[in-house]
Image: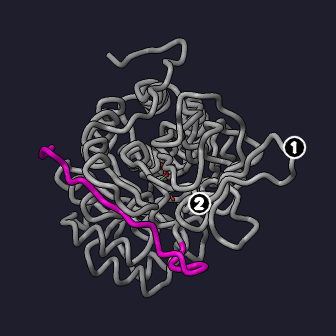
Amino acid sequence: MLPVASTPVPARSAVPTARIEAFLAEERRETPFLVVDCDVVLDRYAELRAAVPSAAIFYAVKANPAPELLDALVHAGSSFDVASPGEIDLALAAGADPAKLSYGNTIKKRTDIARAHELGVRMFAFDAADELAKLTAEAPGSTVFCRVLCDGAGSDWPLSRKFGCDVDQAVELCLRAIDAGHQVGVCFHVGSQQKQPDAYRVAIELVAEQIAAPLAAAGGRLSHLNVGGGFPGTYLTTGPATAVYGAVIERTVVRCFGDDPPVLITEPGRFLAADAGVIETEVVLVARKSLHDEHRWVFLDIGLFGGLAECLGEAIKYPIVTVEGDDGGPKGPVVLAGPTCDSADVLYEEFRYRLPMSLGAGDRLRLLATGAYTTTYAAVAFNGFPPLRTYHLPPSRRA
Ligand SMILES: *Cc1c(COP(=O)(O)O)cnc(C)c1O
């Protein structure tokens, strides 16, 4: 039986693993850098498998495409959500079976579709008639997933508006796809860092009632259901336990589709990678804007352009701990900002972290749960700052 939770189970808190602690204690490495423990990725993979046992897991490569991490997931049996020729190459280089890749980007060049198909990719997403026509021409016989719009309510990093179409168009396009010889699925994304498991219930019900049912009435069948990513990382705000998400998804699928369910897929990115990483950064300057200002500005050697792009709008709030500069004395509010000459490079100003009053230049901080959406969001050399240095600790075991 699946666990049934009536009240949200409190989320775990983010803590560096013993392996990361040992790595950080080895030597004082030049900052900023990210260290990722691939064991945590495998732990999260196992946790999601247990929570949604009937779903195949397609890791969203864009969250962290490091070869060590992809290799660990290939050996664990994972499938992969890829969005570009480059991500396909990375997954294949890690040993992934092309039949276990889903080309989930709804915006693809014709030539890229043809190349993916030639490499053996057989799952593709679309949300427009013209994209479906490209798939029929360049990837005949493949399984095509129509992406439906989701409003992203309850999530900290919504993916609304840009991707997906409404349900009426989805039905129309799915029928067209079946006529063209494809198996059809539906996919959606309830928004990244989704803290409300109920968002999946709402979306699955929408698909069942307003797409699968009219499709069946017209003689078509929904063969796949991809409920996307969205499962949260352990930031200052997070969601309930993974088992709660799993129970909502499994129960809704059973209730909506009975004993003839579509093939179920999840596409976690953040959930698998975020908690595995720790960024170590150094304080460059502590400053005040006026003589009696209570607030200190703390400038770090990493900012919005160095890998912390998800601090835009202060959407994602990483747990921050001090390494040095904490003498056990009082703490006070700070504005946290990056080192570049762009005034947008402020990490947290609305939300006031509290750091030791004794904090000064050269002291180090650690940003926890930074394994997802950091390395690939780092600029190549804005202001001459190099991309984020990374260390990946390979798995200590095989799954
Ligand atoms: C980014 C993305 C994901 C992963 O989302 P998370 O919120 O990180 O789990 C999954 N599917 C698609 C199509 C995506 O673009």
Q: Residue at x 50, y 78 (%)?
A: 380
Crowd class of label 1 (few under 14; some 14 to 19; many from 20; radius 10 Å) = few
Location of residue 62 in the rendering, given as x and y in whole percent from the top left corner: 44, 62
Q: Decide if residue 72 is on the left or right side of residue 150.
A: left
Q: Position of residue 54 (x, y in %)?
A: 31, 35
Percent of width and height locating residue 164: 62, 59
Q: Is residue 339 above or below residue 26?
A: below
Choose top left, top right, bottom left or bottom right for residue 260.
Answer: top left
Give above or below for 364 relative to 382: above
The residue singled out by tag 2 in the image is 284
The quadrant in which the C terminus is found is top left
Q: Residues within 10 Å of mark 2 (few under 14, many from 20)?
A: some
99 left or right of 348? Answer: left
- Mark 1 is on which residue type? His
- Which residue is farthest top? 6
Which quadrant would residue 102 be assigned to in this image? bottom left
Near-viewer residue (239 or 35): 35
Q: Is 395 colored magenta in this rendering?
A: yes
Q: Amino acid at mark 2?
A: Val
Look at discs 1 and 2 and give the one toward the viewer: 1
Mark 2: secondary structure: strand
Q: Which label number is shown at residue 292?
A: 1
The Cα–Cα distance between marks 1 and 2, rounded to whole angstroms, is 21 Å
Examine the rendered structure and indicate whether residue 14 appears above or below residue 141.
above
